[in-house]
Protein backbone atom coordinates (compact mmCIF):
# COMPACT_ATOMS: atom_id res chain seq x y z
CA UNK A 1 0.00 0.00 0.00
CA UNK A 2 1.08 3.58 -0.52
CA UNK A 3 1.97 6.07 2.15
CA UNK A 4 -0.55 8.23 3.97
CA UNK A 5 -0.99 11.78 2.69
CA UNK A 6 -0.83 14.37 5.46
CA UNK A 7 -1.12 18.17 5.55
CA UNK A 8 2.16 20.09 5.05
CA UNK A 9 4.24 20.93 8.09
CA UNK A 10 3.60 24.25 9.78
CA UNK A 11 6.49 25.64 11.79
CA UNK A 12 4.42 27.49 14.34
CA UNK A 13 4.01 27.27 18.08
CA UNK A 14 0.44 26.08 17.60
CA UNK A 15 1.60 23.28 15.32
CA UNK A 16 4.25 22.21 17.82
CA UNK A 17 1.64 22.18 20.57
CA UNK A 18 -0.61 20.05 18.35
CA UNK A 19 2.21 17.59 17.81
CA UNK A 20 2.87 17.33 21.52
CA UNK A 21 -0.78 16.73 22.28
CA UNK A 22 -1.05 14.19 19.50
CA UNK A 23 1.92 12.28 20.84
CA UNK A 24 0.29 12.14 24.25
CA UNK A 25 -2.86 10.69 22.73
CA UNK A 26 -1.11 7.90 20.88
CA UNK A 27 -1.48 6.86 17.26
CA UNK A 28 -3.20 4.22 15.20
CA UNK A 29 -2.49 4.52 11.51
CA UNK A 30 -2.87 0.82 10.77
CA UNK A 31 -5.92 -1.14 9.75
CA UNK A 32 -6.64 -3.33 12.74
CA UNK A 33 -8.29 -6.42 11.34
CA UNK A 34 -10.09 -8.98 13.45
CA UNK A 35 -8.46 -12.41 13.22
CA UNK A 36 -10.51 -15.40 14.42
CA UNK A 37 -8.62 -17.22 17.12
CA UNK A 38 -6.07 -14.43 17.36
CA UNK A 39 -5.59 -11.51 19.71
CA UNK A 40 -8.31 -9.41 18.12
CA UNK A 41 -5.97 -7.36 16.00
CA UNK A 42 -3.68 -7.83 13.06
CA UNK A 43 -1.75 -5.23 11.10
CA UNK A 44 -3.21 -5.24 7.62
CA UNK A 45 -1.05 -2.42 6.33
CA UNK A 46 -0.29 1.22 6.96
CA UNK A 47 -3.17 2.69 4.99
CA UNK A 48 -3.00 3.62 1.35
CA UNK A 49 -3.33 6.87 -0.52
CA UNK A 50 -6.66 5.99 -2.11
CA UNK A 51 -5.35 6.19 -5.63
CA UNK A 52 -6.10 3.85 -8.47
CA UNK A 53 -8.52 1.44 -6.90
CA UNK A 54 -9.06 -2.20 -7.73
CA UNK A 55 -11.81 -4.08 -9.45
CA UNK A 56 -14.33 -3.63 -6.64
CA UNK A 57 -14.94 -7.35 -6.84
CA UNK A 58 -18.10 -6.69 -8.72
CA UNK A 59 -20.48 -6.02 -11.50
CA UNK A 60 -21.95 -2.53 -11.12
CA UNK A 61 -25.16 -3.80 -12.67
CA UNK A 62 -26.24 -5.90 -9.68
CA UNK A 63 -29.88 -4.96 -8.91
CA UNK A 64 -30.93 -3.50 -5.55
CA UNK A 65 -31.49 -6.02 -2.78
CA UNK A 66 -34.42 -4.97 -0.62
CA UNK A 67 -36.22 -8.26 0.09
CA UNK A 68 -34.79 -9.78 3.26
CA UNK A 69 -36.77 -12.96 2.65
CA UNK A 70 -34.97 -13.40 -0.67
CA UNK A 71 -31.47 -13.56 0.74
CA UNK A 72 -30.71 -9.91 1.44
CA UNK A 73 -28.65 -8.90 4.47
CA UNK A 74 -29.58 -5.83 6.51
CA UNK A 75 -26.53 -3.59 7.02
CA UNK A 76 -26.82 -0.68 9.47
CA UNK A 77 -24.57 2.35 9.06
CA UNK A 78 -24.22 5.08 11.70
CA UNK A 79 -22.64 8.53 11.50
CA UNK A 80 -21.36 9.22 14.99
CA UNK A 81 -19.83 12.39 16.35
CA UNK A 82 -20.82 11.40 19.87
CA UNK A 83 -17.92 12.62 21.97
CA UNK A 84 -18.80 14.37 25.22
CA UNK A 85 -17.22 16.19 28.14
CA UNK A 86 -14.72 19.03 28.11
CA UNK A 87 -12.07 17.10 26.19
CA UNK A 88 -14.06 15.81 23.19
CA UNK A 89 -13.72 12.11 23.95
CA UNK A 90 -15.80 8.98 24.52
CA UNK A 91 -14.61 8.30 28.05
CA UNK A 92 -17.88 9.41 29.67
CA UNK A 93 -19.70 6.43 28.19
CA UNK A 94 -22.68 8.26 26.68
CA UNK A 95 -21.57 7.80 23.07
CA UNK A 96 -20.70 4.18 23.76
CA UNK A 97 -24.18 3.44 25.09
CA UNK A 98 -25.87 5.19 22.14
CA UNK A 99 -23.88 3.10 19.67
CA UNK A 100 -24.54 -0.10 21.62
CA UNK A 101 -28.25 0.64 21.48
CA UNK A 102 -28.20 1.19 17.71
CA UNK A 103 -26.26 -2.05 17.05
CA UNK A 104 -24.42 -0.78 13.94
CA UNK A 105 -22.52 -2.80 11.38
CA UNK A 106 -20.46 0.14 10.12
CA UNK A 107 -19.65 3.32 12.07
CA UNK A 108 -18.32 6.52 10.50
CA UNK A 109 -16.95 8.06 13.68
CA UNK A 110 -15.64 11.54 14.48
CA UNK A 111 -13.67 12.96 17.42
CA UNK A 112 -12.58 9.40 18.19
CA UNK A 113 -10.57 9.95 21.35
CA UNK A 114 -10.52 7.15 23.91
CA UNK A 115 -8.29 7.24 26.99
CA UNK A 116 -4.69 7.65 25.92
CA UNK A 117 -5.44 6.26 22.47
CA UNK A 118 -3.53 3.04 22.99
CA UNK A 119 -4.28 0.07 20.70
CA UNK A 120 -5.71 -1.82 23.68
CA UNK A 121 -8.10 1.04 24.53
CA UNK A 122 -9.22 1.40 20.92
CA UNK A 123 -9.74 -2.37 20.67
CA UNK A 124 -11.86 -2.34 23.81
CA UNK A 125 -13.96 0.53 22.44
CA UNK A 126 -14.51 -1.28 19.13
CA UNK A 127 -15.49 -4.46 20.97
CA UNK A 128 -18.02 -2.47 23.01
CA UNK A 129 -19.75 -0.64 20.14
CA UNK A 130 -19.48 -3.19 17.33
CA UNK A 131 -18.30 -6.53 18.68
CA UNK A 132 -15.13 -8.56 19.03
CA UNK A 133 -15.24 -9.51 15.34
CA UNK A 134 -15.08 -5.94 14.08
CA UNK A 135 -12.19 -4.20 12.36
CA UNK A 136 -11.24 -0.53 12.39
CA UNK A 137 -9.07 2.24 11.00
CA UNK A 138 -8.38 5.51 12.80
CA UNK A 139 -6.35 8.29 11.21
CA UNK A 140 -2.85 8.73 12.66
CA UNK A 141 -2.43 11.14 15.54
CA UNK A 142 1.18 11.89 14.71
CA UNK A 143 2.53 13.50 11.58
CA UNK A 144 3.39 16.86 10.16
CA UNK A 145 0.67 18.73 12.04
CA UNK A 146 -0.90 16.09 14.24
CA UNK A 147 -4.58 15.24 14.47
CA UNK A 148 -6.28 15.90 17.77
CA UNK A 149 -9.90 14.92 17.07
CA UNK A 150 -9.42 12.05 14.64
CA UNK A 151 -11.91 10.45 12.30
CA UNK A 152 -12.22 6.72 11.84
CA UNK A 153 -14.24 3.84 10.46
CA UNK A 154 -15.35 0.73 12.39
CA UNK A 155 -16.71 -2.24 10.46
CA UNK A 156 -18.24 -5.63 11.11
CA UNK A 157 -16.87 -6.53 7.67
CA UNK A 158 -13.18 -6.85 6.71
CA UNK A 159 -11.43 -3.60 5.82
CA UNK A 160 -9.48 -4.26 2.64
CA UNK A 161 -7.73 -0.90 2.44
CA UNK A 162 -7.87 2.42 4.28
CA UNK A 163 -6.12 5.74 4.62
CA UNK A 164 -6.54 9.48 4.91
CA UNK A 165 -6.61 12.52 2.64
CA UNK A 166 -5.33 15.83 3.93
CA UNK A 167 -7.92 18.40 4.96
CA UNK A 168 -5.92 21.62 4.59
CA UNK A 169 -8.80 23.67 6.02
CA UNK A 170 -8.24 22.40 9.57
CA UNK A 171 -5.12 21.34 11.51
CA UNK A 172 -6.61 18.69 13.78
CA UNK A 173 -8.18 16.02 11.56
CA UNK A 174 -8.28 14.71 7.98
CA UNK A 175 -10.64 12.84 5.67
CA UNK A 176 -10.66 9.10 6.42
CA UNK A 177 -11.61 6.45 3.86
CA UNK A 178 -11.90 2.68 3.86
CA UNK A 179 -12.80 -0.09 1.43
CA UNK A 180 -14.85 -2.85 3.04
CA UNK A 181 -15.73 -6.37 1.93
CA UNK A 182 -19.45 -6.06 2.65
CA UNK A 183 -21.97 -8.80 1.73
CA UNK A 184 -22.57 -9.29 -1.96
CA UNK A 185 -20.36 -8.97 -5.02
CA UNK A 186 -19.56 -5.27 -4.53
CA UNK A 187 -17.20 -3.63 -2.09
CA UNK A 188 -18.11 -0.49 -0.16
CA UNK A 189 -15.93 2.64 -0.25
CA UNK A 190 -16.79 4.89 2.69
CA UNK A 191 -15.61 8.34 3.79
CA UNK A 192 -15.73 9.54 7.40
CA UNK A 193 -15.77 13.35 7.50
CA UNK A 194 -15.65 16.20 9.99
CA UNK A 195 -15.82 19.44 8.03
CA UNK A 196 -14.81 22.93 9.08
CA UNK A 197 -17.36 24.47 11.42
CA UNK A 198 -15.83 27.97 11.42
CA UNK A 199 -15.14 27.92 7.69
CA UNK A 200 -18.70 28.85 6.82
CA UNK A 201 -20.51 27.63 3.71
CA UNK A 202 -17.67 28.73 1.41
CA UNK A 203 -15.00 26.88 3.38
CA UNK A 204 -17.03 23.70 3.60
CA UNK A 205 -17.75 23.85 -0.14
CA UNK A 206 -14.01 24.04 -0.75
CA UNK A 207 -13.53 20.88 1.28
CA UNK A 208 -16.30 19.24 -0.72
CA UNK A 209 -14.63 20.14 -4.01
CA UNK A 210 -11.45 18.40 -2.87
CA UNK A 211 -13.44 15.31 -1.93
CA UNK A 212 -15.22 15.14 -5.28
CA UNK A 213 -11.89 15.40 -7.09
CA UNK A 214 -10.31 12.68 -4.96
CA UNK A 215 -13.27 10.35 -5.29
CA UNK A 216 -13.07 10.52 -9.08
CA UNK A 217 -9.93 8.37 -9.00
CA UNK A 218 -10.07 6.68 -5.60
CA UNK A 219 -13.25 4.61 -5.63
CA UNK A 220 -12.56 1.09 -6.93
CA UNK A 221 -14.43 0.19 -10.09
CA UNK A 222 -17.85 -1.24 -9.27
CA UNK A 223 -17.71 -0.34 -5.58
CA UNK A 224 -20.61 1.23 -3.73
CA UNK A 225 -19.97 4.65 -2.21
CA UNK A 226 -21.05 6.16 1.12
CA UNK A 227 -20.04 9.59 2.41
CA UNK A 228 -20.95 10.49 5.97
CA UNK A 229 -20.19 12.14 9.24
CA UNK A 230 -20.25 15.63 10.69
CA UNK A 231 -20.52 18.10 7.81
CA UNK A 232 -21.33 21.01 10.17
CA UNK A 233 -23.88 22.37 7.69
CA UNK A 234 -26.23 25.14 8.81
CA UNK A 235 -28.92 24.03 6.34
CA UNK A 236 -29.52 21.54 3.53
CA UNK A 237 -29.07 24.12 0.77
CA UNK A 238 -25.41 25.02 1.43
CA UNK A 239 -23.21 25.04 -1.72
CA UNK A 240 -21.41 21.99 -0.30
CA UNK A 241 -24.52 19.87 -0.78
CA UNK A 242 -24.72 20.77 -4.44
CA UNK A 243 -21.04 19.97 -4.86
CA UNK A 244 -21.39 16.55 -3.22
CA UNK A 245 -24.45 15.82 -5.38
CA UNK A 246 -22.01 15.13 -8.21
CA UNK A 247 -21.09 11.83 -6.55
CA UNK A 248 -23.80 10.97 -3.99
CA UNK A 249 -27.54 11.41 -3.47
CA UNK A 250 -28.13 14.56 -1.41
CA UNK A 251 -31.90 14.94 -1.78
CA UNK A 252 -34.49 13.86 0.76
CA UNK A 253 -36.33 12.33 2.38
CA UNK A 254 -33.79 12.49 5.20
CA UNK A 255 -33.40 10.55 8.45
CA UNK A 256 -35.56 11.93 11.25
CA UNK A 257 -36.64 11.26 14.82
CA UNK A 258 -40.10 10.09 15.89
CA UNK A 259 -41.39 13.66 15.66
CA UNK A 260 -40.11 14.07 12.10
CA UNK A 261 -37.23 16.36 13.06
CA UNK A 262 -34.20 15.73 10.85
CA UNK A 263 -31.86 18.25 12.49
CA UNK A 264 -28.93 16.66 14.25
CA UNK A 265 -27.15 19.22 16.42
CA UNK A 266 -27.79 19.24 20.16
CA UNK A 267 -30.42 22.05 20.07
CA UNK A 268 -32.05 20.18 17.13
CA UNK A 269 -32.15 23.13 14.73
CA UNK A 270 -29.36 22.41 12.21
CA UNK A 271 -28.57 19.39 10.00
CA UNK A 272 -24.95 18.87 10.96
CA UNK A 273 -24.67 15.12 10.37
CA UNK A 274 -25.28 13.16 7.17
CA UNK A 275 -25.20 9.75 5.51
CA UNK A 276 -24.98 10.17 1.73
CA UNK A 277 -25.01 7.06 -0.50
CA UNK A 278 -24.43 6.87 -4.22
CA UNK A 279 -27.42 6.05 -6.42
CA UNK A 280 -26.87 2.29 -6.33
CA UNK A 281 -26.66 2.12 -2.55
CA UNK A 282 -29.61 4.50 -2.20
CA UNK A 283 -31.70 2.10 -4.27
CA UNK A 284 -31.06 -0.57 -1.61
CA UNK A 285 -32.15 1.48 1.40
CA UNK A 286 -34.47 -0.32 3.81
CA UNK A 287 -36.72 1.10 6.52
CA UNK A 288 -34.70 1.19 9.72
CA UNK A 289 -36.34 -1.02 12.33
CA UNK A 290 -36.00 -0.74 16.10
CA UNK A 291 -38.44 -2.86 18.05
CA UNK A 292 -41.89 -2.07 16.68
CA UNK A 293 -40.79 1.30 15.25
CA UNK A 294 -39.93 1.78 11.57
CA UNK A 295 -38.13 4.79 10.10
CA UNK A 296 -38.50 4.76 6.30
CA UNK A 297 -35.55 7.08 5.62
CA UNK A 298 -33.38 6.39 8.65
CA UNK A 299 -33.22 7.65 12.22
CA UNK A 300 -31.86 10.69 14.01
CA UNK A 301 -31.49 9.30 17.52
CA UNK A 302 -32.12 11.66 20.42
CA UNK A 303 -32.31 9.61 23.61
CA UNK A 304 -34.10 12.48 25.39
CA UNK A 305 -37.23 11.82 23.36
CA UNK A 306 -37.06 8.30 21.91
CA UNK A 307 -39.74 5.86 23.06
CA UNK A 308 -39.61 3.12 24.13
CA UNK A 309 -36.00 3.71 25.10
CA UNK A 310 -35.76 0.14 26.36
CA UNK A 311 -35.49 -0.90 22.70
CA UNK A 312 -32.14 0.91 22.61
CA UNK A 313 -30.70 -0.56 25.81
CA UNK A 314 -28.25 0.26 27.35
CA UNK A 315 -28.75 3.86 26.13
CA UNK A 316 -30.06 6.22 28.80
CA UNK A 317 -32.45 9.13 28.38
CA UNK A 318 -29.81 11.65 29.35
CA UNK A 319 -27.09 10.39 27.02
CA UNK A 320 -27.92 12.81 24.17
CA UNK A 321 -28.01 15.64 26.72
CA UNK A 322 -24.56 14.97 28.15
CA UNK A 323 -22.24 17.90 28.64
CA UNK A 324 -20.26 18.50 25.47
CA UNK A 325 -22.52 16.23 23.40
CA UNK A 326 -23.05 18.43 20.34
CA UNK A 327 -24.51 15.93 17.86
CA UNK A 328 -27.10 13.19 17.47
CA UNK A 329 -26.35 9.82 15.88
CA UNK A 330 -27.71 9.31 12.36
CA UNK A 331 -28.48 5.76 11.21
CA UNK A 332 -29.60 4.11 7.98
CA UNK A 333 -30.23 0.50 6.94
CA UNK A 334 -29.36 -0.96 3.55
CA UNK A 335 -30.07 -4.34 1.98
CA UNK A 336 -27.11 -6.13 0.42
CA UNK A 337 -27.09 -9.56 -1.24
CA UNK A 338 -26.07 -12.42 1.01
CA UNK A 339 -22.96 -14.30 0.05
CA UNK A 340 -19.93 -13.22 -1.99
Image (tube, grey):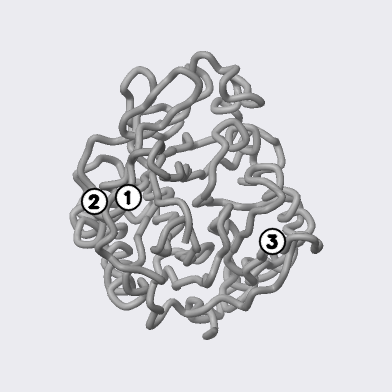
Which of the pair 239/65 is nearer the observer?
Answer: 65
Q: Earlier in the sequence, mark 2 or mark 1?
A: 2
Residue 224, placed above or below residue 276:
below
Residue 42, placed above or below residue 232:
below
Q: Earlier in the sequence, mark 1 or mark 3?
A: 3
Query: Residue 276: image x %, image y %?
Result: 32, 50
Which mark is in front, 1 or 3? 3
**Residue at 20% in and 44% down:** 251
Residue 173, placed above or below residue 218:
above
- In terms of image quadrants, where is residue 147? bottom right
Query: Residue 229: image x %, image y %?
Result: 43, 50
User: In the displayed image of the protein, which residue is found farthest to the top?
Assistant: 308
**Residue at 59% in and 33% down:** 98
Which mark is in front, 2 or 3? 3
**Residue at 36% in and 66% down:** 223
Relative to 148, 194 lies left or right = left
Disc assigned to residue 110: none
Relative to 43, 110 lies left or right = left
Residue beneath disc 1: 276
Q: Mark 1 falls on what kind of element?
A: strand
- In terms of image quadrants, where is residue 220? bottom left
Residue beneath disc 3: 34
Circles 2, 1 touching at the beta carbon (< 8 Å): yes
Q: CA distance from mark 2 to mark 1?
A: 6 Å
Q: Earlier in the sequence, mark 2 or mark 3?
A: 3
Q: Residues within 10 Å of mark 1 (few under 14, many from 20)?
A: many
Q: Residues within 10 Å of mark 3 (few under 14, many from 20)?
A: many
Q: Mark 3 falls on what kind of element?
A: loop
Residue beneath disc 2: 249
Amino acid sequence: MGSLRRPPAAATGLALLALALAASLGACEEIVQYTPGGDGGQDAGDGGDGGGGGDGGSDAGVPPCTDLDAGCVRVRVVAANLSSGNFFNYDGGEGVRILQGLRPDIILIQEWRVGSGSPAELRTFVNQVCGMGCSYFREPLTGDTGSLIPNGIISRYPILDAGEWADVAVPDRDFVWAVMDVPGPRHLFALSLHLYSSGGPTGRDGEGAVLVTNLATAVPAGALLLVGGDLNTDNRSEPLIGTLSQVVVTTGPYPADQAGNGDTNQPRNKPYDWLLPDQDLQASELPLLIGQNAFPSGLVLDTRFYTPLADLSPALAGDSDAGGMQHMAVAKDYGLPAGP
